[in-house]
Image (spheres, rainbow, N blue to C red):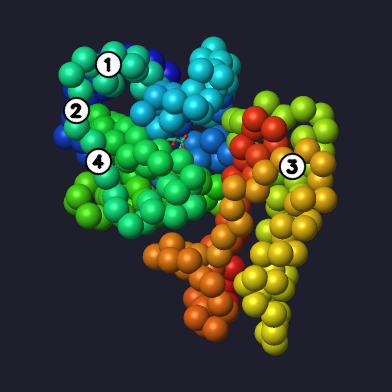
Amino acid sequence: MKILRTIASAQKLTTQLRIKNKVIGFVPTMGYLHNGHLSLIREARKKADIVFVSIYVNPLQFAPNEDLSRYPRDFIRDEMLCRKGGVDYIFYPSNEMMYPEGYSTYAIVEKLTDGLEGKIRPGHFKGVTTIVLKLLNIVQPHFSVFGQKDAQQAAVISKMVRDLNVNTKIKVLQTVREADGLAMSSRNVYLTKEQREDAPFLYRALQFAKRKLELENYNKDIAFLHGQMSKLIKSRKTATKIDYISFNDYETLREISSLKNAKNSKILVSLAVRFGKVRLIDNIVIKR
Ligand code: PAF
């Protein structure tokens, strides 16, 4: 496994790999890898000749009041996990490499970024789409693998790739969970013992919605479900703030306010909840 720190070296290599018809699979990450990332790497390993992982905590997707400086980092451990996972190349650039002085070009996806995370974290998706487009131009992968836990991110990136005709495929894999249902996330390490005990209630709330929505003759509406989920989460002392619980069309991300408008559709139920300073997101997709 090799570590590439410059754009020129990565781009030169991937250009040569493409000429040799090698299939390049790519997993972009911000490091501090967990089993969720490892499942994305496994998928890439199954389908690609060459597996690239990028490790880069992208400052552009963090607002000034967010956790950029506290974001967990452990490159030595990440390197070991990538080696074990059969990764061929890690792209590990510096901020100066990715955003040199005078940098001024951005990728913006409209509409899909208006709600959910985009509403609570203005500017976040501009940072995500800009860095992902840059990484795709550098790594030139045939396909890239993302996790469903960041459902809106996956939808926004897929849209950008379609709209800008980027020559790559986007695969989205199921969220990997701890035994008690908590979605794996690099931010879980911040949770105190009490917060960690309460955090699985997010998944319980999502499952509550799933059970109800899958009932054939379910005769209550979104507002009721929202209220019940909210009650369940608020019953946990360490869940300090619900940023949102939202029901959206899975394809368009349009908000669904009544089940009458959601026949034969896939509903994305998603939530973001703060446990003190730790903000967790999760979601589930329900077919009706
Ligand atoms: O999901 C992430 O870890 C990041 O948003 C990504 C896609 C690596 C871009 O920085």
Mark 2 and mark 3 lie on one chain; the one further toward the N terminus is: 2
Disc on the earlier residue, 3 or 1: 1
Mark in the foreground, 3 or 4: 3
Q: Which label is found at residue 239? A: 3
Cα separation, mark 2 vs mark 1, equals 14 Å
- Which residue in the structure is indicated by mark 4? 107
Q: Give the residue type that dot 4 points to.
A: Ala
> Mark number for residue 97?
1
- Tags 3 and 4 touching, CB below 8 Å: no
Q: Residues within 10 Å of mark 1 (few under 14, many from 20)?
A: few
Number of residues whose C-alpha sits closer than 10 Å to that of mark 4, classed few (under 14), some (14–19) or many (20 or more): some
Q: Residue at position x 35%, y 48% from top?
A: 157
Identified by mark 3, the residue type is Ala
Label at residue 104:
2
Question: Where in the figure is residue 102, as x and y percent of width and height?
Answer: 18, 19
Element under disc 1? helix
Q: Nearer the viewer, mark 3 or mark 1?
A: 3
* Depth order, front residue of 83/162: 162
Say what amino acid the circle numbered 1 marks.
Met
Report the front residue among 29 and 141: 29
